[in-house]
Image: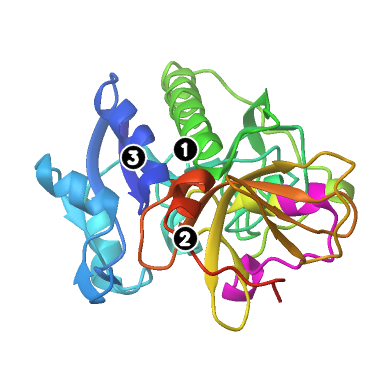
Amino acid sequence: MRVVFCGNPEFALPTLKALLASEHEVTAVVTSPDQPQGRGRKLAPMPVKEFALANRLSVMSPPKLKDPEFLSQLRELSFDALVVVAFRILPREMFALPKFGALNVHPSLLPKCRGPAPIQWTLLRGETETGVTIIRLTEEIDGGGMLAQERTFISPDENFGNLHDRLSALGANMLVKVLSRLGQGEAIQPILQDESQVTTARKLKPDDYILDFRLTGTELQNRIRAFSPAPGAVAKSNNISIKILSAELANSDVCLQPAQVLQLQDSIIVGTGDRPLSLKSVKPAGKKEMAVAEYLRGRPTLPDRFE
């Protein structure tokens, strides 16, 4: 089957690589224009574009997906399906072009977590199970019929980075199988999503990463997991800002007020709305991630409490 691949970030790369290793043909890769990245905010290609160029694939980076010239170029490719992974909202002019429409790899058990940040919101909500859903795109965001869905359990200590990598690999395998079934003439009947079960996964804002220690210890653990290893959940006071990348519930006999900081010889314990948290790894401003014991060897000046 001839496909056009649409994607931008690291999450999309396993699917593109799986397609290249399969019997299917990637006729072109559609990505966003170069974006400001890094501390210098210099324009640079997104991971999918960088990989595609390095592997001499045909790349298209239109500023607007409704651009008539871009759509004309797509039509000339005579492809069978669009494959969409972590990309932009496609206009009908695009997903109506190929025979099999546009197939999207979404890292959640739809209709749960519709939106741009499904993995983070799955962890934020303390879910113990998630998965990947392959849908056929429609004009309703993440609301199309489901062609395949697979479930997986979430380990209690699994963070965003771990889960991201597992789901991207799972989605890649699922997508190739769905394409193969369609290419062999199998009529896959899309399953309608249950609208009564919809939850959303809105785009995250900078304020979402700042920890509120009035929450329970478990809720704070979920936030730390959801933002680790990047961008990192932030604990702040007047003179310090530190990213907490992992933590565990402290012994129940430790009694602290919410946000109160207890510094021991090789550990840091912070009060929460119920059971305190013992910090395991942190990333101070401008430094690398390190274990708390290593961080304390640098004799940091910690506040009596976080904000």
Q: State which quadrant residue 266 falls in.
A: top right
Q: Is residue 279 above or below residue 36?
A: above
Closer to the N terminus: mark 2 or mark 1? 1
Q: Residue at x 74, y 54 (%)?
A: 220
In three-dimensional space, the C-alpha distance between marks 1 and 3, rounded to whole angstroms, equals 22 Å
Q: Is residue 46 above or below residue 203?
A: above
Crowd band around label 3 with a 10 angstrom C-alpha radius: few (<14), some (14–19), many (20+): many
The quadrant in which the C terminus is found is bottom right
Q: Is residue 133 visible?
A: yes
- Could you tell me the amino acid type at mark 3? Leu
The residue labelled by disc 2 is: 299
Q: Are marks 1 and 3 in contact (CB under 8 Å)?
A: no
Crowd band around label 2 with a 10 angstrom C-alpha radius: few (<14), some (14–19), many (20+): few
Tag shown at residue 13:
3
Q: Is residue 26 above or below residue 289?
A: above
Q: Position of residue 270 (x, y in %)?
A: 73, 57
Q: Are marks 2 and 1 in contact (CB under 8 Å)?
A: no
**Magenta span covers which residues?**
205-221
Q: Residue at x 62, y 47 (%)?
A: 267
Q: Residue at x 65, y 40 (%)?
A: 108
Between 258 and 198, the residue placed more toward the observer is 258
Q: Secondary structure at mark 2?
A: loop
Left or right, 120 with respect to 81, comes to right
Q: Secondary structure at mark 3?
A: helix
Left or right, 170 with respect to 45, comes to right
The residue labelled by disc 1 is: 100
Q: State which quadrant residue 160 falls in.
A: top right
Q: Position of residue 34 (x, y in %)?
A: 24, 68
* Nearest to viewer (mark 2 / mark 3): 2
- Is 296 within the magenta? no
- Is 220 within the magenta? yes
